[in-house]
Image (cartoon, rainbow, N blue to C red):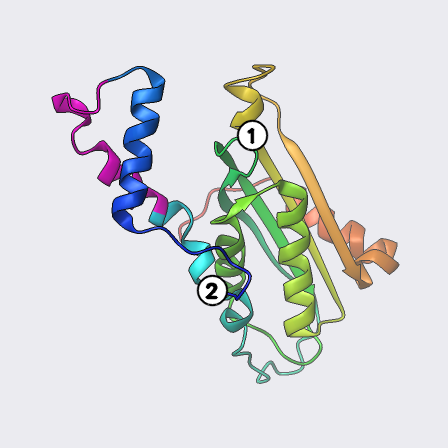
């Protein structure tokens, strides 16, 4: 926690806050079905917002240079994305696609997915989330280029407000070769849009 971060409330204070919200919503937190709800909500928040306690830079710290000279695009697509809107605290559900052009070193693919997960498990807007993922990959891996595309549905507009289900938001950030070279960018976009054939994992 940084010096500028507000003091974190205790678990008991967090549970009391949930109880207050239940009362505000018009229900009785002392009825049988809600007795354990404050504790359950706090435990779920620990999972939903676990990204605040993890360092995405540290996640990428270990890379490998035994690549036999591999210098082509590395793409990880269709990574499930679960986050929460910082304006209404409702789910953002979608998928992420990331790519980078290695400069001699590569990173384990699970680390790419974990960086996405760490940033997603914080209160977010999709534009900021997209930039955070791309910027971190560029800063730590020092590749020739980075590309990130996120596609997601926001429950702040599907289940409230304008009530428009079926709408998805697409954001992208292209850095280095993906920004400067049209053919590199097109290759990446073609790869993430290619039909998905079923296969045994």
Q: Report how far apart the C-alphas of labels 1 and 2 lie in the structure.
A: 29 Å
Q: Residues within 10 Å of mark 1 (few under 14, many from 20)?
A: many
Closer to the chain start, of discs 1 and 2, is 2
| Viewer-nearest residue: 109 or 123 | 123
Q: Position of residue 148 (x, y in %)?
A: 67, 52
Q: Secondary structure at mark 1?
A: strand
Q: Secondary structure at mark 2?
A: loop
| Viewer-nearest residue: 53 or 108 | 53
Above or below, 144 against 18 in this view is: below
Q: Residues within 10 Å of mark 2 (few under 14, many from 20)?
A: few
Above or below, 42 against 58 in this view is: above
Please report the residue visible at 56 percent of the width from the left and 70 percent of the height from the top: 57
| Viewer-nearest residue: 149 or 189 | 149
Q: Position of residue 199 (x, y in %)?
A: 45, 47
Residue 8, located in which quarter of the rendered image? bottom left
Please report the residue visible at 16 percent of the width from the left and 29 percent of the height from the top: 35
Please report the residue visible at 12 percent of the width from the left and 23 percent of the height from the top: 32
Q: Position of residue 65 (x, y in %)?
A: 60, 84
User: In the image, is 159 to the left or to the right of 191?
Assistant: left
Kindly identify which residue carries mark 1.
Answer: 154
- Start-end of magenta stretch: 28-45
Please report the residue visible at 70 percent of the width from the left and 74 percent of the height from the top: 142
Residue 141, located in which quarter of the rendered image? bottom right
**Main SS of residues in magenta:** helix
Kindly identify which residue carries mark 2.
Answer: 1
Q: Mark 1 near mark 2, Cβ–Cβ under 8 Å?
A: no
Q: Is residue 123 magenta?
A: no
Above or below, 63 against 53 in this view is: below
């Amino acid at each position: 926690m940084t010096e500028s971060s507000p003091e974190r409330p205790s678990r008991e204070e967090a549970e009391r806050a949930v109880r207050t919200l239940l009362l505000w919503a018009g229900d009785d937190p002392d009825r049988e079905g809600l007795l354990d709800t404050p504790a359950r909500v706090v435990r779920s928040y620990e999972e939903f917002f676990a990204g605040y306690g993890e360092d995405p830079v540290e996640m990428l710290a270990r890379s490998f240079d035994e690549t036999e000279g591999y210098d082509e695009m590395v793409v990880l697509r269709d990574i499930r994305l679960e986050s929460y809107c910082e304006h209404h605290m409702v789910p953002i559900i979608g998928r992420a696609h990331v790519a980078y052009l290695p400069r001699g070193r590569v990173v384990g693919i699970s680390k790419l997915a974990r960086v996405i997960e760490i940033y997603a498990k914080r209160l977010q807007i999709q534009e900021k989330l997209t930039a955070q993922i791309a910027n971190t990959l560029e800063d730590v891996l020092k590749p020739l280029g980075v590309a990130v595309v996120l596609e997601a549905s926001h429950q702040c507009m599907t289940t409230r407000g304008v009530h428009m289900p079926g709408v998805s938001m697409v954001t992208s950030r292209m850095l280095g070769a993906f920004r400067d070279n049209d053919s590199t960018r097109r290759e990446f976009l073609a790869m993430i849009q290619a039909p998905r054939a079923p296969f045994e994992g």
